[in-house]
Image (cartoon, grey):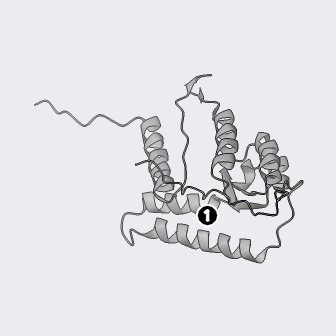
Amino acid sequence: MNRTSAPTIPIWQEERDKKNKFMQWLRSNGFMVVTKDGSPAEEGRYKANVDVMMAIDALELSVEMRPDVVILVTGDADFAYLVVKLRRRGIRVEVASVAQNLGNALKSTANDVIDLAALFRTFELKNTRETGDALVGGQAARSLALARDARVTNVQDSSPPVTQRPQQPASGRQTHRRRRPRFRPPS
């Protein structure tokens, strides 16, 4: 009698599935997620260089959409210069990262920092829990968002390094700003 068993799932595929679930959650909650397939670098690792893409997208969107707040989900200190540029445009910049991966330069230039450790623990609990409430991830994400909103409204914002304000026309007429398009995540 021959026995055949289901093929084992490689660990990289499980990790990819976890990341895909997290990215889907981000998209369904209104985040713009930029992904790029990596190219092989060193043994077992890939390099994608998405930092340049993120910086260009953030600057482009700041001009096109004029958002009040930009949340960068990264800890890479190379983004500190982008934060300065966005703040000079009068945009509040928050950085979402895990504390141990957050660069000091990025932390010091951002208006606020959101620690993602609690959110990641919630996803771990949701993925490993066999019984119980299936909404644990969503509930924890909502409570994290509420805590963030309360902290933001209670914190006195520091002024951006340099504010560029549009000048009124000489005729005294007020200019009408174009209405900002609402961002809708791709389906």
- When asked about the image quadrant of residue 49, the answer is top right
In the image, 18 versus 6, the foreground residue is 18
* Residue at horizontal 67 percent and vertical 55 percent from the top: 71
Q: Count the numbered circles shown.
A: 1
In the image, 167 versus 135, the foreground residue is 167
Q: Residue furthest front?
A: 171
Q: Is residue 1 left or right of residue 172?
A: left
Decide: few, some or many residues near mark 1? Use Cα within 10 Å; few <14, some 14-19, many ≥20.
some
Image position, residue 52 (x, y; %): 68, 33
Residue highlighted by disc 1: 118
- The kind of residue tagged 1 is Ala
* Residue at horizontal 68 percent and vertical 37 percent from the top: 56
Image position, residue 117 (x, y; %): 64, 59
Element on which disc 1 rests: helix
Image position, residue 106 (x, y; %): 80, 49
Image position, residue 12 (x, y; %): 47, 36
- When asked about the image quadrant of residue 54, the answer is top right
Q: Is residue 175 above or below residue 104?
A: below
Quadrant placement of the N terminus: top left
- When asked about the image quadrant of residue 40, the answer is top right
Residue 103 visible in this rendered orientation of the protein: no
* Residue at horizontal 45 percent and vertical 57 percent from the top: 28
Q: Is residue 44 above or below residue 184?
A: above
